[in-house]
Image (tube, helix red, strand yellow):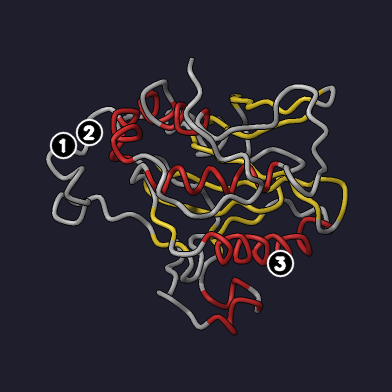
Amino acid sequence: MAECSDSPPIAEASQDASQDGCVVSELEPNRLYAVLTYGGDLAAWNWAFYVPNPSVTPIGASGTMFHVINSSSEWTLEVTTKDIVSSPLAVAIVLLGDVGFLGNYEDIVGQDSLLPMFKAVAVPASGSAIHPAEFSSRTWFLDAICVLHDCGVVTCDDVWLLEREIRRFAFTAMDKYMQNRGWTAYKRISFAFRHLDTTPSSVPSLLSENLRFSSIDRFFMTGFGCSYSSSGFLGAAQQG
């Protein structure tokens, strides 16, 4: 599997990502991915998070997808089991980080780990007349990155730069996708986003005593410290 160079210059980000050694042929277990699926236009994608189920091969043939959908003019969080590697709509799959420290697959996607974090990202109220530019799967995704950052699951230096890097990967992947050659997976984003080092010595002091305690506890302990909110809908944790 290809290795990626650390922190390539920003000028290189617009080049073919394969030149940076970031294109990979398969997904890995215990990882959190960004998945961009075709939205009907060359520059329109639906943004989602994905955790593959390691018990199903090939990795990515089954897993849990977290994203927001707009049904009957109402935005809701959807959590679904998805075969992403066989999906005809998958364009770009980007590795965000190793989440194995949260436990096994059921722990990672369950009620005490990622799920309550994603539920904490507010969506427009039912019937709200929100312009698509103000809220979308993309803006929800970026707000969710802030929650994951504040919970210590990932660390993101600059969410705007992260968005730009993911979009560049997707634009590159569209060439292959439009030739009916499927999705492209990428190992890492250049320097906007760094994987969380989950060795005990490197975890923030708040978390270092016990890496495996409930991540929802960690969520309420750390709160929201991210200054970014793409849509103004980043809010307090929802119940349930």
- Quick check: 118 left or right of 132? left
Q: Residue at position x 72%, y 42% from top?
A: 135
- Residue, disc 3: 172
Q: Earlier in the sequence, mark 3 or mark 2?
A: 3
- Residue, disc 1: 210
Q: Amino acid at mark 3?
A: Thr
Q: Earlier in the sequence, mark 1 or mark 3?
A: 3
* Secondary structure type for disc 3: helix
* Secondary structure type for disc 1: loop
Number of marks present in the image shown: 3
Q: Which mark is residue 39?
A: none
On the image, the x and y values in percent for residue 23 come to: 56, 64
Is mark 3 in CB contact (under 8 Å) with mark 2? Answer: no
Classify residue 161 by image quadrant.
bottom right
- Please tell me how crowded label 1 is: few (under 14), some (14-19), or many (20+) other residues with Cα within 10 Å: few
Q: Amino acid at mark 1?
A: Asn
Spatial separation of the CA atoms under disc 3 and disc 2: 37 Å
Of the residues tagged 3 and 2, which is closer to the observer? 2
On the image, the x and y values in percent for residue 78 come to: 64, 25
Work out whether 184 lies above or below 12: above
Is mark 2 in CB contact (under 8 Å) with mark 1? Answer: yes
Q: Residue at position x 49%, y 70% from top?
A: 190
Q: Residue at position x 43%, y 28% from top?
A: 55
- Quick check: 40 left or right of 1? right
Front one among 181 and 36: 36
- Residue, disc 2: 212
> Which residue is situated farthest in the top direction here?
240
On the image, the x and y values in percent for residue 188 come to: 48, 62
Front one among 68 and 134: 134
Front one among 82 and 224: 224
